[in-house]
Amino acid sequence: MNAFKPGFFIVVISCLLFTAVQAQTKKPEFNVIAFYTGKNDKAHVSFVHEANKWFSKIAEANKFRYDSTSNWSNLNPVFLSKYQVVLFLDTRPEDPEQRRAFEQYMKNGGAWMGFHFSAFALKDSAYPQNWDWYHNVFLGSGQYGSNTWRPTSAVLKVEDAKHPVTKKLPATFKSSPNEWYRWSNDLRKNPDIKILLAIDSSSFPLGTGPKAYEIWHEGYYPVVWSNTRYRMIYFNMGHNDMDYEHPPHNKELSFSFANETQNQLILNSLLWLGPAKK
């Protein structure tokens, strides 16, 4: 019978621990920073909390690092130099210096992913259309036009099945509930814009009201698109359904990241924006 050799087991355990440490300390392929405000509409706040949890959860398995901040003063060249992808989860920068820093970051090859309200702009509102480059050139959408209400699911149609973002997605799929936006500009007329997903006509009527104009019965509505002049993608999704009317008020009725197909679309987009494939 072989004698017990403790030295052998010490070596084996040391090797296993070293391998585990290596796996945990392996440098990510790219770094992501998400900016958010998270103070206004409860539906947007709900989405922000949900997004931060979801991106943090999937980061290590997909070889990226995820950080988030509500300090918009971090939107400066020194801070941004640490990150390859920037996310706007709910709003946009308002300070002129922050806006210039973001525009320069994008023109220098940075990447961006935006959700829902980050594209909102409306004259004489708290978020006026006073940033022409961002809304008309970068996003291409112009001002907010109108929205559906209540937040409801829609059948989304893939408009470009060959794009890396839409790979392995079905031709149509049902989204998580959302408040859908209409824009002042027709994105189909902009040669720089690549529309990736739009609302399928089978979704109509879309919305439940109570106001008649909050229910859409026809029309063409892009919901995910990219600007081919930049490394960017915008998602109109990002507004959870909330129970504002009944106690306990502000109860969450839906979650944006409770949809596997939609999640795959977002993950595909983030990995496409990551520098490893550029």
Image (spheres, rainbow, N blue to C red):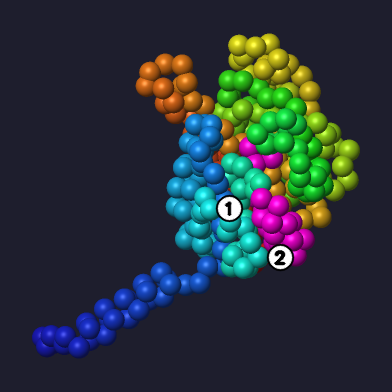
At label 2, counting other C-alpha atoms closer than 10 Å, the crowd grade (few under 14, some 14-19, many 20 or more) is few
In which quadrant of the rendered view does residue 90 lie?
A: top right
Please state which amino acid type lies under the numbered disc 2: Lys
Q: Which mark is residue 72?
A: 1
Instruction: Where is residue 79? Give x, y as percent.
Output: 59, 65
- Establish if 98 lies above or below 202: below
Instruction: Where is residue 62? Give x, y as percent.
Output: 52, 59
Instruction: Where is residue 157? Give x, y as percent.
Output: 71, 34
Q: Nearer the viewer, residue 88 or 14?
A: 88
Rendered-image quadrant of the N terminus = bottom left
Please state which amino acid type lies under the numbered disc 1: Trp
Residue 114 colored magenta? yes
- Establish if 205 lies above or below 64: above
How many numbered marks does the figure carry? 2
In which quadrant of the rendered view does residue 271 lie?
A: bottom right
| Residue found at x 63% / y 61% | 76
| Left or right, 217 with reference to 207 | right
Q: Nearer the viewer, residue 120 or 273?
A: 120
Label pair 1/2, CB-CB below 8 angstroms: no
Question: In front of the other: label 1 or label 2?
Answer: 1
Q: Is residue 36 visible?
A: yes
Q: CA distance from mark 1 to mark 2?
A: 27 Å
Q: Which residue is mark 2?
A: 278
What secondary structure is found at the residue carrying circle 2? loop
| Residue found at x 68% / y 25% | 147
At label 1, counting other C-alpha atoms closer than 10 Å, the crowd grade (few under 14, some 14-19, many 20 or more) is some
Instruction: Where is residue 66? Give x, y as percent.
Output: 51, 58
| Left or right, 270 with reference to 41 | right
Range of magenta residues: 95-119
Q: Is residue 171 visible?
A: no
| Residue found at x 43% / y 72% | 25
